Image: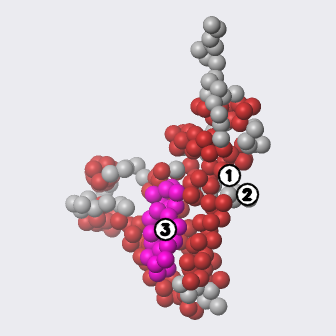
Amino acid sequence: MATEPADTPRRTSLSKQMVLREAVALADEAGTGAPSMRRLAERLGVEAMSLYHHFRNKDMILDGMLDLVFGEIELPSDVDWRTAMRRRAVSMRGTLIRHPWAIGLMDSRTNPGHATLRHHNAVIGCLRSGGFSIAGAAHAFSVLDSYIYGYTLQELSLPFKSSVDLEDVAGSILKQMPRDEFPHLTEMILDRALKPGYAYTEEFDIGLDLILDGLQRQRESWP
């Protein structure tokens, strides 16, 4: 009985979700956006042309990948707007850390999927129910996302991943730096960065509270 050569792609019953999940996995591994159709087909064990039965082009795959990412973010629930926005911010940061390639792309697409639209609609609805005007909801949505995206991008770019790594980096800088010339930076490193138990992720919560406090004070003054 004849058998297929070892390098022949296996025949797989593809679905859109299967393709998108593998595309996201590849992007997570590479740290970039949508993989090439050829690379994705190899991962799935099919010919590249098989992908075109589900997606006309690479842009459609990227749209679908970002929609999967948005689908991982916790939607606002029936709690007060501040608690809901905090939970959503924490969830979004965690999602972006898992999928760092998505940060610069999440709001760049012109064909958002259902999960993306559902997410945006839920956030706006939560803010409106919390007493924000249309303009106020737009301001709140914008400043929260700018903070979440910016903080996460900075966090992913830092040369340390743990408190131990931070101590090594900060200690190395301190050894090379003339302390009398940079007294404020020295103080920050000694009394903050190298303080036992300090974790950079604490700064996210502090900054988020500052923003939420400001939105709380301002929300009823926006027309």
**Label 1 element class:** helix
Q: Residue furthest top?
A: 1
The Cα–Cα distance between marks 1 and 2, rounded to whole angstroms, is 7 Å
The one nearer the camera, 182 or 85, is 85
**Label 3 element class:** helix
Q: Give the magenta range.
A: 72-96
The one nearer the camera, 176 or 34, is 34
Marks 1 and 2 close (CB-CB < 8 Å):
yes
The Cα–Cα distance between marks 3 and 1, rounded to whole angstroms, is 21 Å
Give the residue pinned by disc 2.
111
Q: Residue at x 64, y 18 (%)?
A: 8
On the image, the x and y values in percent for residue 173 come to 33, 52
Counting residues from the start of the chain, the first of labels 1 and 2 encountered is 1
In the image, 128: left or right of 172? right
The one nearer the camera, 97 or 75, is 75
Is residue 183 in the magenta section? Answer: no
- Residue 155 in which image quadrant: bottom left
Q: Amino acid at mark 3?
A: Arg
Give the residue pinned by disc 3.
88
**Label 2 element class:** loop
